[in-house]
Amino acid sequence: MTERAILLKKLSAVEFAAHELHIYLDTHPDDVSAGKAMNEYDRQANALRLEFESKFGPLTPGEDGNRWAWISDPWPWNNQED
Amino acid sequence: MDVIKKLQASDFFIEPIPKNAVEAMAYVPFQNAKTLYSPEQGICMGTLFPELSLPFDPENRMRGDGQ
């Protein structure tokens, strides 16, 4: 896999973990250790997103001032680099 | 290959089925998470929680993990 694909996979996994804990906390709001784990995965996801976007461009329209930059990346079917 | 992360021990525990359960009422056993998959394992299994990893296994009519 390319560096881009590896980083994107890692980001997806950590975002998934943070979201899983988020919806768990909807029904278990007093589970302090789950809250700490979610904050840790949120922190990791933010760091990975910053790293990805600094190397490969924005993932979402976001607030970087250029609303089209995020779709100038390769689309899923433009997978020649993977 | 289960990569497991232990949640920090805490006092959090809710009875899976209420002690004062009432006849003819349906209950969903309450989840008390103690361990988590690693993010990489979790995204493959479709859940971060080992106790919710229940692949459909109609042949054996049992938990997919053999429990």
Image (cartoon, coloured by chain):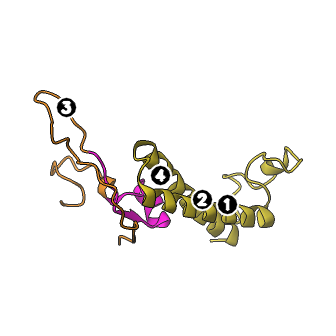
Between the C-alphas of marks 4 and 3, the distance is 25 Å
Residue tagged by mark 4? A20
Circles 3 and 1 on the same subunit: no
Horizontal relation, residue A79 to residue B22: left or right: right
Q: Chain of mark 1?
A: A
Residue tagged by mark 2? A42
Identity, as a three-letter code, of the amino acid under mark 2: Asp
Residue tagged by mark 3? B26
Identity, as a three-letter code, of the amino acid under mark 1: Asn
Q: Chain of mark 4?
A: A
Identity, as a three-letter code, of the amino acid under mark 3: Ala
Between the C-alphas of marks 4 and 2, the distance is 11 Å
Mark 4 against mark 2, which lies toward the viewer?
Answer: 2
Residue tagged by mark 1? A46
Chain with orange colouring: B
* Label 3: element kind: loop
- Earlier sequence position, callout 1 versus callout 4: 4
Between the C-alphas of marks 1 and 2, the distance is 6 Å
Residue density around tag 4, few if under 14, some if 14–19, many if 20 or more, within 10 Å: some
Name the residue located 44 percent from the left edge and 61 percent from the top edge.
A33
The stretch of residues the image draws in magenta is: B30-50
